Image (cartoon, rainbow, N blue to C red):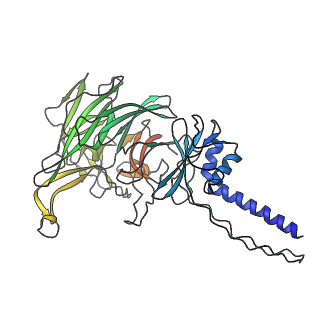
Amino acid sequence: MRQSVKGLVLVAALCIASVVSAASWPQLQSRLEQWQGEKEVVLPVGVDPFEDEVLAPVLDLLLEQGYVILPGDGSSSKGLTIELRDTSHGQRLLLKRAADGALLAMEKLVAPPVAAPVVLSTSAHVQPQALKSVAAPAPQAVRVITTTTRPTQLSVQQPPQPAPAGEVLFELEGAPLQIVSWPLGAGKQELYLLYDSYIQRVSYDGRSLQLLDKFSAPIKSTRALHLDLGDMNNDGIPELAVVWAEDVRGVADATNTVLHSWLLSSGQQGLRVVSADLGGYLSLAENGCYLQKRSPYKPFAPAIYRVTMDGNKVAISDQPVEYQERLLFNQLQWPDSERALVWNDEQRLMLVARSKDTRIPGSTLLTDFGLYRGATVSVPLREPEYRSGFSANDRVMAHDFVLNRRMVRAGDGVYTIVRGRSEGLPLVGRPNGSDALVKICNQGDTLSVVYPFARVDAYIVDFSLEDGVGSEAAVLLNEKADGSGRAYLRLQKAL
């Protein structure tokens, strides 16, 4: 009878261990089961598969599913690779595709707890003995960036749901701040990433990214400000409107941001400049290209000029086509030519009558879009201001003007970003919450918001709609709200 009890205890322990192992790696297990390529995995360099207790559950999972495990000094161009990376939130396990380095899953590693021993009585009594054991631990909190078959949320606090089929996540070099895309058909597209001192032109074929071209800013010491894309002369070749900022420090310690903007052509010869430095905010959309200049003591002047292109010749209208009290990037002509969707001072969206530039009653959308801090423009003050006294340290010589998040018109709506993620308390807090792409709809003068895409537990820095109807998006993600952390590109499909 005693042997029977021991056998039951052993079977129960094995069952619990199996359940805990599967529950601890739900997304990793799903990705491994769905993998259609070579079933081989390369371990990190220096990992001993016989001694590493942290990776032991992962190795067991790989072997159970028939994977061949290669040592860290091995190589595989068709299978998968495992990497270990230390982050501010602890150690992470990365599962990548060996062919192109695409990130398929990222899970939190936790050292296995030391379990209390199971106490079995050695008494000769025939009755079953009471067992003392530690309850099976709850599944570990994980953060997963994955491609599966259902809507997803990326989370560092709880296991997320799988992502819609076909979603892919790539880790990017550096920290791009803007993204635009140009469809090529058959699921292919070209992506343009704006960095502080250059633009990358990248192709995506439905599986991997390939760098095609790199264009460096014509001047030094710049910051990324804005990037737009369109076909100005209807020749099938996209043009890019790029704006970089140069911060000039004056003798009076006031920082003044000088704007530099160019039109670029993207053809078989690569990215090339087709205009002089236009020196202002340059916006390129489906209804044309427009230029708005800086004022000496204001972030922008009200005059807006039209920019046209005939062949490779760029011209600016002699007279302003309109005057606006808002920045070009903070407004969008929608839902018709008589109205515009604008951001107000409280970071809320509303409709205005374009002829009078007045708010349309009842059109203000009360949705909280969150605090979004885009690129800044430093504007010197005509007279210095003082915080609390009149010392040099209290003097303020310039103000920062913050550019708002992107708005894109597609189909019957407008798409933008809801910033639901926060950085938490200073020093001790951790980022929490989710960002999302949302669609703004209208019924008459009444606005509403729908969430066509899955939320993500990362900061959405910028985005581009791939198709013009809002069913697919290229989303630029970052670990930090200001876009200075590790960057990722997520190709997202509507739910």
Q: Residue at x 34, y 53 (%)?
A: 482
Between 367 and 472, which is closer to the camera in this rendering?
472
Residue 319 is drawn in which quadrant?
top left
* Spot occupied by residue 97 in the image (x, y as percentages of width and height): 55, 39
Q: Residue at x 52, y 34 (%)?
A: 207
Q: Residue at x 31, y 54 (%)?
A: 373
Residue 286 visible in rendering:
no
Q: Is residue 196 left or right of residue 398?
A: right
Residue 303 is drawn in which quadrant?
top left
The N terminus sits in image quarter: bottom right
Residue 249 visible in rendering:
yes
Q: Is residue 255 left or right of residue 437?
A: left
Between 308 and 148, which is closer to the camera in this rendering?
148
How many discs appear?
0
* Spot occupied by residue 448 in the image (x, y as percentages of width and height): 41, 52
Residue 140 to residue 237: above or below? below
* Spot occupied by residue 98 in the image (x, y as percentages of width and height): 55, 38
Q: Is residue 96 left or right of residue 458?
A: right
* Spot occupied by residue 358 in the image (x, y as percentages of width and height): 23, 51
Residue 127 to residue 256: above or below? below
